Amino acid sequence: MLLQSGFDVALGLGLLWVAWQALNSSDLFKAIVFFIAFGLLMALAWVRMDAPDIALAEAAIGAGVTGALLLGALARLRASNAGETTMGQAGNGQRRFMASRRLLWIPLLLMAAGLGYAVLSLPGYTPGLSAQVAANLGASGVSNPVTAVLLNFRGYDTLLELVVLLLALLGMWSMAGPAPPPSAEAAAVLDGLSRFLTPLVLLVAAYLLWVGTRAPGGAFQAGSLLGAAGVLLILAGWRANVASTALSLRLVLTAGPGVFVAVAAFSLLMSGQMLKYPPAYAGILILIIEIAATLSIGLTLAGLFLGGRPRGERKSP
Amino acid sequence: MNAAVLYALVGVGLYSLGLYALIVHAHLVRKILAINVMGSGVFLVLVALARRGGEAGTDAVPQAMVITGIVVAVSATALALILVVKLAAETGYATLSGNRQE
Amino acid sequence: MPAGSAVTGVSWGALLVLLPLTGAMVCFLWTRAARILGLSTVIAVCLAVAGLGWQLLQEGVYHHAAGGWGAPLGIELYADGLSLLMLIATAAVALAVSIYSTGYFKRARAIRFWPLWLILLAALNALFLSADIFNLYVTLELVGLAAAALTALGGGAAALRGAMRYLLASLLGSLSYLLGVALLYHSFGSVDIAMLAARMESSPTVWAALGLMSAGLIMKTALYPLHFWLPPAHSSAPAPVSAVLSGLVVKASFYLLLRLWLELFGSVSEGIDNMLGLLGSVAVLWGSVQALRQTRLKLLVAYSTVAQLGYLFLAFPLAASAMTAWNAAAYLVISHALAKAAMFLAAGNLMHFAGHDRIADLDRMVQRLPLTVFAFALAGVSIMGLPPSGGFIGKWLLLEAALTQGRWDLVAVVILGGLLAAGYVFKVLGSAFTQAAVPQRARRVPASMEWPALLLACAAIVLGLVTLPVFSLVTIGDAFGVDEVVP
Amino acid sequence: MQQLYLALAMFLLLNLGAGLWRVLRGPTAADRMLAAQLFGTTAVAVLLLLAQAFGEAALRDVALVFALLAPVTAVAFVRRLWPEQGNSRDTD
């Protein structure tokens, strides 16, 4: 018990310290490395809170995609000489202004204290919805409660959330123009690594998707892994030979939200309530939606890392 | 004080640290990191408080909400990063005030 | 089966979300037909709003349990008169903006515009229909990201900077809101608004949630002093996007604030309403003065939005005469939505025509673009609050509520704000009548861009003539929670 | 037995602190990146220990994902940032 408390206290303090470093390091690259470490500690925190589903999602998205996104953006910022901290560029007046803003910690400390008090003074334990989830789990078509909530009980949220992901890609395409050209040919080691690692990642993604119906895992974790595999391939200089207008690419990108909307519309037509699955078919419907969602999430995340519309003409090994 | 409350307080701390950094720093990538740290703090509060009843209280609903939140956060981060990259390519600065034309 | 039940049998609310989502994806997949597909989707959404309205008139409030589970486990969609009013305003502005966009956006940009815009429309509809505070968080994020992406569509440093500022403000707002959601969920074990309302009781946690959610939504609504992101974003976006941002997007977060205030926090929020009133008053005066000082047309219109949003918050300290004050707020929300969208579309025409938006150089626009200037003037009538416009009714109701409660300070603010608004509207119109020093090149403005502005402005005026139907609409489901007689 | 696993996990967590120190001090970007990599490896070990201590099999999946994805950020660093700054000292 003591050891557990010690672990929790150390982890909590570590989280705060790493977050502070990630936010206030003088060097932006250092800040990003600390942020990647922060994601790692967050995953451990999720484990300690009995939330392995979130730990998986945090690990897959945090370790794979977010870190790569940040590093990629930093590289492009350095290319336009904007990757430094602003202190060097700011004039004296700017600095004084910044200094006055640093006094901000006083009201923020008060706010934090107030919020902390609010958390501590929560009226006694409320059971939340765990009882309802348990009672209806049998009719949901899956036996992992988190997947049941995500794809059945609160499937409407998940539908909208897949649209958010698609929206991010659409927004990026609308402003970014074509993706930057791939960097130099990958060295043999990287090439070998990506050839060796990609199938493994795909295999684990498939496993997580399959296991997600009854144990921690599911479409998001699997999709994030696919996305990470895509990031790896992009980094190794691999480019799909498709124009940005290629219909097949856009079909996969919209597969997740598309299938979800189709199921919603069909159930609306059949039962008058959107996303109400007949219990007998709930399992298979969820599986279909999850497969489509996994593909879309993976391709979207990889597309977001690409940093622009895919180029059509480039051919790579 | 049990572990759940501890983590919830850490979440509040992360939220506040992020808010501070968001206001104080001018570099947009730092602001984006700040938003992400704030988000992690909120997620931590959301999940941790569900366990203040002890080991028995694993509530799947906040966990599912956090997974939704993580995906939303990644989308927002990606969109914000590409905006910064474009802005820097256009103006040479990755800040909101830095400005070459005006 | 009579025609009526065929209409009421359909779940129009769910369609209001699914239709534009489908439209967005189809536009994305079939880019060649994006314009025609997008426009048809918006027309279909307008029909669905009509269907929902008919349904509400026949059967009262609309409930839909997504997934068939119902609260608290599942997500409930809910629509009463207030939601319907917002949906109607959204549909009206959306239709006008969509027609305008067919002329405004040329091929390459049109392909990018339509999917983003339809997702934004779906998100707005979903927000107005949701009765679940976590689902509302997702819709808020969807609205914010879509709006930021659309703002950046203009390209160029100003638009990118405006979009970035807006995105950061919007994310901060939604995260604060989400922390509030977390506290409420753990206080009462539900995220359904009706259930929370039934279990609500005052506690430090609830106050913290109230503060966080209100602050987040106020930030998104751009109430002074959290308005700093609005003028750069709204003035640098493409014209149809500006119209949507100023007309609808800021109203969405205000609507949510109003909902939470009326249904959740009304009983525990003593004293804060006066502060909101004070900030609203400052916003009205400061925003109007700023608008008056601008030399660029779009910035002027954007600052006018800051001022007009201030009026909405004047209703909070007057809530003692609830029906009048909330009716005033509802009236101001929709009349401003129509009038401000019309103004931005008209400003977009002037910019398209002259290639700039310097107010002083608006060279005899009244002869060259009579329809557009007329639209701007009509919208201005509603913004100023002159009869017989919708803006007049809203401000009149505010005055009435302020007078009955003896709040002379608020009376003064309303009147002064109206005078200042007259100042900046006439500043623009004055320049439109005079000859500029430098003769300028001119580009033709297609009819598809002139008429939507004019029709929206006319709608803002007509709104002042149909008060009784609007009032009776709002009473469906008794959103304001009072049984006062309609004034 | 559980106590032993927990004690080991605790020890590794403190080890992470040592890795963090290297991230903090640098002096080159490559040092920081490598420290973060080491960090990932340690986290994998912590996860496996916790999986054993609490009998939670899913934690092994988390460890697996970490182990698989650790190279991604490293490759991103090497491919995108290395050419210009890998060896140079940071502005500290």
Image (cartoon, rainbow, N blue to C red):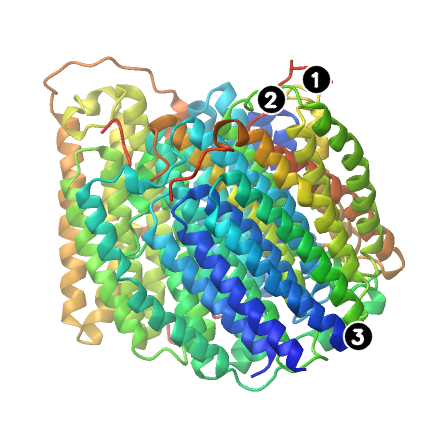
Label whose residue precedes the other's in the sequence (3 or 2): 3
Please, is residue C423 above or below residue C108 in the view? below
Q: Label 3 to label 2, Cα distance in Å?
A: 52 Å
C406 left or right of A227 in image? left
Q: Label 1 to label 3, Cα distance in Å?
A: 53 Å
Per the image, the residue denoted by label 3 is A135
- Residue projecting furthest to the bottom: A124
Give me the disc on residue A316: 1
Q: Measuring 74% from the left and 32% from the top, which residue is drawn there?
A: A194
Q: Quadrant of residue C467?
A: bottom left
Residue C412 horizontal/vertical position (percent): 13, 63
Q: Measuring 25% from the left and 30% from the top, which residue is drawn there?
A: C373
Q: Measuring 51% from the left and 29% from the top, which residue is drawn there?
A: A174
Q: Chain of mark 1?
A: A
C277 left or right of C187 in image? left
Q: Secondary structure at mark 1?
A: loop
Q: Quadrant of residue C196?
A: bottom right
Amino acid at the residue labelled 2: Pro
Mark 3, other Cα within 10 Å: few <14 / some 14–19 / many ≥20: few
Label whose residue precedes the other's in the sequence (1 or 3): 3
Residue A43 horizontal/vertical position (percent): 64, 59
Q: Chain of mark 2?
A: A
Give me the disc on residue A182: 2
Q: Are marks 3 and 2 in contact (CB under 8 Å)?
A: no
